[in-house]
Image (cartoon, rainbow, N blue to C red):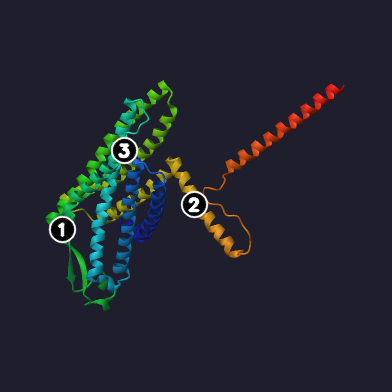
């Protein structure tokens, strides 16, 4: 067991760094593409991607800070200012993580009521409007600020005569004053663990578990109605989006439920050795979930894939044109704006119509020749 823990401690930092970078890039791209096809549901998805983006960037800062203070033993990072920034990072990590969970719960509820509206009313008008989307976001962020209230008073910055971890590695640093985070109140810490495990983990997982069955039942009813009335296009559209949301819900249940159990147990009893490594493992799984969400958004949404592809193509085309202009400044070239560029389908229609016109003209000429020859004979 000790060998496995030692191996995991070695591979944890690079893996987490890779996931943070991948998640950051992925959510930036998803937010950029979702913003180009804005609707009430995508507004909620943009907010969720934004919270996941902040979580990835903030966790990357935490990893780099710990590496600088505990591994490299950089004494400037032991100052009060850097320690205060680390305290902000710790609190922010909990807040944005909780916000992400609340977003998934809100998505499940919104999807259920949207499906319920579709199944009861034979209408294509959306139930989830921009006003309801904004109200949902306000409720999510206000709930997060209220629930996270005790976390703001849990830790404080204290001055210590030396950095315990680094002094054992570099004895010459003995006597260098450092600032560290310390728990202000043990009872408050236990309350926070229970609060974080129950309200932010277990209860949302239970809600997601119940909503999964409700959504599946409502989706089954919609399929039966569409088979009866022949509205297959609406069935496929809602089916794709619902599948994506269901997969996100199940992933959150698998990742968050064990964390909730561990947090509640930690609020009652002292966990054995190795619990810290399990906590790091769950945090890494949370980062992996953040990356999977971006992959799901791209795989289940063809519009998002097309927008992402066009975004890359436009950037690459612009970069290629600028490079050609730098290499051949005297070469004459024709530059089209975005609205003036013709797609491949436009060229295809143009040449097809031209070929049809030429064929019709040739046939008319042949018929005229045959008629003249017949009259002459």
Q: Residues within 10 Å of mark 2 (few under 14, many from 20)?
A: few
Quadrant in which the C terminus is drawn? top right
Rounded to the nearest angstrom, the CA distance separating label 2 from label 3 is 30 Å
Residue drawn at point x = 25 percent, y = 73 percent: 167
Q: In the rendered image, which residue does mark 3 sit on?
A: 129
Q: Which residue is mark 1?
A: 153
Q: Secondary structure at mark 3?
A: loop
Q: Nearer the viewer, mark 2 or mark 3?
A: 3
Q: Earlier in the sequence, mark 2 or mark 1?
A: 1
Point 25% across, 56% down: residue = 92
Residue that label 2 marks: 312
Instruction: Tell me the element at label 1.
Output: helix
Q: Residue at x 29, y 48 (%)?
A: 100
Q: CA distance from mark 2 to mark 1?
A: 45 Å
Q: Nearer the viewer, residue 72 or 239?
A: 239
Mark nearer the N terminus (3 vs 1)? 3
Instruction: Please identify the quarter of the rendering in which residue 21 is found.
Output: bottom left
Q: Are marks 3 and 1 in contact (CB under 8 Å)?
A: no
Residue 198 x %, y %: 20, 45
């Amino acid at each position: 067991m000790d060998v496995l823990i030692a191996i995991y401690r070695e591979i944890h930092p690079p893996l987490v760094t890779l996931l943070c970078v991948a998640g950051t890039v992925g959510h930036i791209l998803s937010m950029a593409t979702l913003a180009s096809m804005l609707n009430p549901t995508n507004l909620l998805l943009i907010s969720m991607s934004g919270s996941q983006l902040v979580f990835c960037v903030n966790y990357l800062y935490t990893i780099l800070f710990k590496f600088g203070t505990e591994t490299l033993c950089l004494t400037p990072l032991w100052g009060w200012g850097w320690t205060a920034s680390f305290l902000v990072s710790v609190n922010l990590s909990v807040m944005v993580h909780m916000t992400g969970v609340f977003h998934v719960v809100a998505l499940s509820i919104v999807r259920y009521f949207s499906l319920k509206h579709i199944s009861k009313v034979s209408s294509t008008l959306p139930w989830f409007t921009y006003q309801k989307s904004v109200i949902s976001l306000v409720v999510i962020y206000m709930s997060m600020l209220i629930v996270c209230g005790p976390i703001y008073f849990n830790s404080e910055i204290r001055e210590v005569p030396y950095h315990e971890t680094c002094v054992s590695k570099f004895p010459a640093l003995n006597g260098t004053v450092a600032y560290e985070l310390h728990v202000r109140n043990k009872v408050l810490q236990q309350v926070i663990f229970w609060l974080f495990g129950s309200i932010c983990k277990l209860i949302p997982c239970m809600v997601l578990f119940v909503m999964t069955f409700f959504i599946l039942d409502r989706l089954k009813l919609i399929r039966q109605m569409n088979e009866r009335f022949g509205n297959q296009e609406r069935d496929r559209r809602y089916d794709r989006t619902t599948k994506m949301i269901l997969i996100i819900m199940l992933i959150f249940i698998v990742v968050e439920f064990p964390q909730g159990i561990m947090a509640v147990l930690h609020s009652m009893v002292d966990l054995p050795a190795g619990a810290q490594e399990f906590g790091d493992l769950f945090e890494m799984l949370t980062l992996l979930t953040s990356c999977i969400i971006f992959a799901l958004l791209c795989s289940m949404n063809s519009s998002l894939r097309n927008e992402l592809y066009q975004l890359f193509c436009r950037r690459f085309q612009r970069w290629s044109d600028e490079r050609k202009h730098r290499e051949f400044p005297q070469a004459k070239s024709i530059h089209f704006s975005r609205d003036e560029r013709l797609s491949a389908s436009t060229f295809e229609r143009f040449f097809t119509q031209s070929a049809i016109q030429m064929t019709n003209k040739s046939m008319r000429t042949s018929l005229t020749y045959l008629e003249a020859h017949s009259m002459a004979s």
